[in-house]
Image: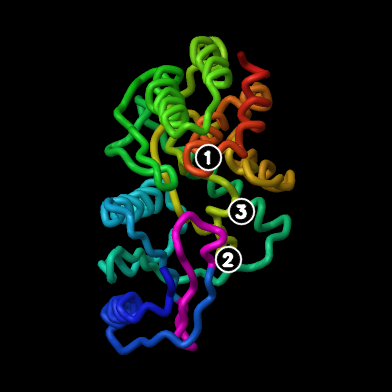
């Protein structure tokens, strides 16, 4: 999809004009598609910036509507900042997700602490069960959230086993690695540590899903459910390291169990399997490194 598609541009301009109550026309585009799993970018009329992403997936409208609902849930329940939504609108052969753009600032120690504090505020919200009100999406993949009381059972049944099957079915995961994965699944009750009080989770809390602004950290691209707070903590530096200031900001709000360091890669395994399914076997070394620790 190219942003010069006249139908896509017309749908975007009409949606923003309706939202703002006056004409709005695209004057400049900053394409951000290389940083996301959807074509996306920042669009401006010279005064007002708008973020939009586009999907041609068969369930794109459902996916974007759920994302919008999950953002509003985080804002209402945890009081964190999320982008102001414009809407989910059909465009050409796909669907647009549109929100007001955020004016990002360079991250220093203060911004990293704000990110940690924002994640802790989400984790302060608790439930008596793991799961959520509805299923949602981890990137492009459906994520089941049927409630279960015990975290180790939830993690096996709704995260590891489905992702393992999908990775095997994709042809990207060798049988020997799948066998190691099954050994880890069998040991989950021992590996998961004490059963936590389920916390509200971002669900995909890698650092690029926080935007640092003058007002603080803004949350984007959630995959919300209730579960082990260490899941989010394990994903914050999934792609690249974060400074200690992030964890300092988090610990100013909530403690981190000393056993987290031993469990960090255990919580990343579902993400490794998802990446292998979608992107291919290049991610297998990270998975096998984790499996050696727990099999």
Whether residue 194 is visible to the viewer of this picture, yes or no, is no
Image side of residue 10 versus residue 254, left or right: left
| Separation of marks 2 and 1 at Cα, in angstroms | 29 Å
| Separation of marks 1 and 3 at Cα, in angstroms | 28 Å
Q: Residue furthest front?
A: 171
Query: Residue 293, how many percent across, how many down?
Result: 67, 18
Q: Earlier in the sequence, mark 1 or mark 3?
A: 3
Residue 275, which numbered label? 1
Give the residue drawn at x 46%, y 58%: 81
Residue under label 2: 213
Say whether marks 1 and 3 touch (CB < 8 Å). Answer: no
Identify the image quadrant of the N terminus. bottom left
Residue under label 3: 114
Give the residue drawn at x 60%, y 43%: 236
Q: SS of the residue at dot 2? A: strand
Query: Residue 5, how many percent across, how many down?
Result: 37, 77
Query: Residue 287, how many percent across, how many down?
Result: 61, 29
Q: Using the rendered view, name the quadrant where residue 272 is placed.
A: top right
Q: Earlier in the sequence, mark 2 or mark 1?
A: 2
Q: SS of the residue at dot 3? A: helix
Identify the image quadrant of the C terminus. top right
Above-or-below relation of 173 to 71: above
Give the residue drawn at x 64%, y 38%: 251
Above-or-below relation of 201 to 82: above
Please check the rendered image and state whether residue 144 is part of the magenta-colored stretch, yes or no.
Answer: no
Q: Specify the segment rendered in magenta.
A: 32-49
Front-most of residues 170 and 40 = 170
Q: Using the rendered view, name the quadrant where residue 126 is placed.
A: top left
């Amino acid at each position: 999809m190219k942003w010069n598609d006249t139908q896509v541009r017309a749908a975007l301009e009409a949606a923003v004009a309706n939202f703002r109550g006056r004409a709005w026309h695209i004057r400049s585009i900053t394409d951000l598609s290389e940083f996301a799993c959807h074509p996306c970018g920042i669009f401006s009329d010279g005064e007002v910036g708008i973020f939009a992403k586009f999907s041609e997936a068969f369930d794109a409208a459902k996916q974007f509507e759920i994302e919008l609902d999950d953002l509003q849930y985080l804002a209402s329940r945890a009081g964190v900042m999320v982008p102001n939504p414009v809407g989910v609108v059909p465009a050409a052969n796909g669907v647009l997700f549109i929100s007001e753009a955020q004016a990002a600032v360079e991250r220093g120690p203060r911004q990293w602490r704000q990110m940690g504090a924002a994640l802790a505020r989400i984790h302060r919200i608790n439930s008596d069960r793991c799961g959520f009100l509805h299923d949602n999406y981890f990137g492009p993949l459906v994520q089941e959230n049927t409630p279960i009381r015990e975290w180790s059972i939830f993690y096996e049944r709704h995260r590891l086993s489905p992702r393992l099957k999908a990775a095997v079915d994709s042809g990207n995961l060798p049988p020997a690695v799948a066998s190691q994965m099954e050994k880890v699944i069998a040991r989950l009750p021992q590996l998961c540590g004490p059963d936590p009080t389920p916390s509200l989770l971002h669900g995909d809390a890698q650092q690029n899903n926080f935007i640092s602004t003058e007002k603080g950290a803004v949350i984007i691209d959630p995959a919300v459910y209730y579960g082990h707070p260490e899941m989010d903590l394990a994903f914050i530096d999934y792609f690249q390291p974060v400074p200690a200031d992030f964890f300092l900001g988090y610990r100013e709000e909530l403690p981190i169990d000393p056993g987290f360091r031993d469990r960090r890669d255990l919580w990343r395994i579902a993400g490794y399997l998802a990446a292998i399914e979608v992107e291919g076997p290049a991610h297998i070394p990270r998975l096998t490194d984790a499996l050696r620790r727990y099999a």
